[in-house]
Amino acid sequence: MLFSSLPDRVRLTEVGPRDGLQNEKIVVDTRAKIAFLTDLVDAGLQHIEATAFVNPRWIPPLADHAEVARATQQEPLAGRARFSVLTPNVKGYEGARAAGIDEVAIFLAASESHNQKNVNASTTEALARYAEVTDRARADGVSVRGYVSCVMGCPYEGVVPIQSVIDVAVRLMEMGCSEISLGDTIGVGNPRQTVNLIRAIKGSVDINRIALHLHDTRGTALANIAVALEEGIRSFDSAAGGLGGCPYAPGASGNVATEDLVYMLDGMGVASGVDLHKLVRASLRMEQVLGRQVPSKVVAALRGTVDDTAFSS
Ligand code: HMG
Ligand code: MG
């Protein structure tokens, strides 16, 4: 029977402070980012991707990565959640380490063209960079998460063969990644495709080490997560408010909203550890910073019913 073996709990990785803010037109003030992180922790999120140690000329909104990363080691954030950061190469890794970070994420597309645009390297070159990062991380006892992007389609190449996704995922696992997050970067996937992908990849990568990172560009993310739960996936990425996008993926919009995901999980009896109302307040406060409404449907439904002033002031 459908949904007869749902888990009691799933793991969420909150990517709002990184993926959510990297594509914003305005550069959010560092103090507002730290307040956002604090709100997210207060709402119960246990793993948060805080920023990216990428070239600030490429991603200006995250140019304050060192300051944000250091803040995660200080009051009121220190020790209250796991904070990871994106690192595209050894330079980024060293910056993250200097800021006290002990969990990083590396990212690579299953499509050659997207890698050229996003990390200015071929897939082979990028894998060589990441081998250096993972060697350093292993020696330092630093945990590394691996993203595979464009798993359901590429903005430049269109269809991406499942075998290309598996090949990149296996290489990242062999390098020592603790978890592989499969990214529908431009939000083109559907439930049937999601099931096919999971069934194909779980022969090569332990399903307990696979996460899904779904952008909700065409409104299919929750449907894809529902079937992924049924297929045994227990780890999902999302962004508060549904913020997000990749500047090197034309047409990509926000990640699945953490509120929308938590609402669905709560209703299905699957715990995530997140307090939905506190999370909505976090997104409402971020709306004030950004000067626009966030795309989350659940935030829209609860807007006006949640006091956005009395939280984490
Ligand atoms: P590059 O320009 O080819 O690098 O960038 P380079 O090695 O030729 O160096 C050029 C300059 O960049 C040098 O500075 C380096 O020091 C500097 P200069 O001497 O000219 O002053 N540089 C750096 N600066 C800061 N931090 C660094 C760094 N590395 C070199 N780490 C690079 C190559 C990979 C750095 C660049 O292409 C880059 O920053 N790309 C990041 C793009 C990005 O952040 N994209 C969005 C994240 S991925 C995503 O959103 C997808 C995901 O969400 C999953 C999904 O949705 O599927 C994860
Ligand atoms: Mg993304």
Image (cartoon, rainbow, N blue to C red):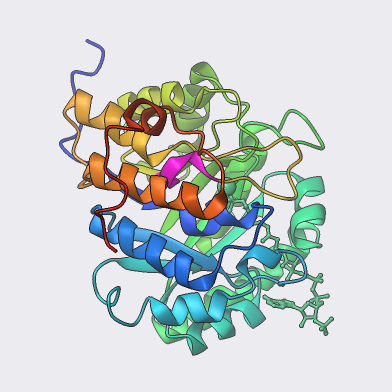
Q: Nearer the viewer, residue 294 or 191?
A: 294
Q: Quadrant of the N terminus?
A: top left
Magenta part of the protein: which range?
237-243
Q: Residue furthest top?
A: 1
Residue 14 at what x, y percent from top left? 40, 52
Asked if the magenta segment contains residue 106, the reply would be no
Q: Residue furthest bottom?
A: 98
Q: Quadrant of the C terminus?
A: bottom left
Quarter of the figure with residue 188: top right
Residue at 54% over, 74% down: 134
Q: Is residue 175 visible?
A: no
Horizontal arrangement in the rendering, residue 307 relative to residue 175 (left or right): left
Q: Tell me: residue 231, above or below residue 9.
A: above
Q: Nearer the viewer, residue 146 or 42?
A: 42
- Mark count: 0
Quarter of the figure with residue 265: top left
Q: Is residue 253 visible?
A: yes
Residue 36 at what x, y percent from top left? 40, 60
Q: Nearer the viewer, residue 61 or 197?
A: 61
Horizontal arrangement in the rendering, residue 252 relative to residue 241 (left or right): right
Q: Nearer the viewer, residue 9 or 193?
A: 9
Residue at 71% over, 72% down: 56
Residue at 44% over, 41% down: 241
Horizontal arrangement in the rendering, residue 163 relative to residue 2 (left or right): right
Residue at 46% over, 52% down: 286
Residue 259 at what x, y percent from top left? 35, 37
Residue 12 at what x, y percent from top left? 33, 48
Horizontal arrangement in the rendering, residue 218 relative to residue 75 (left or right): right
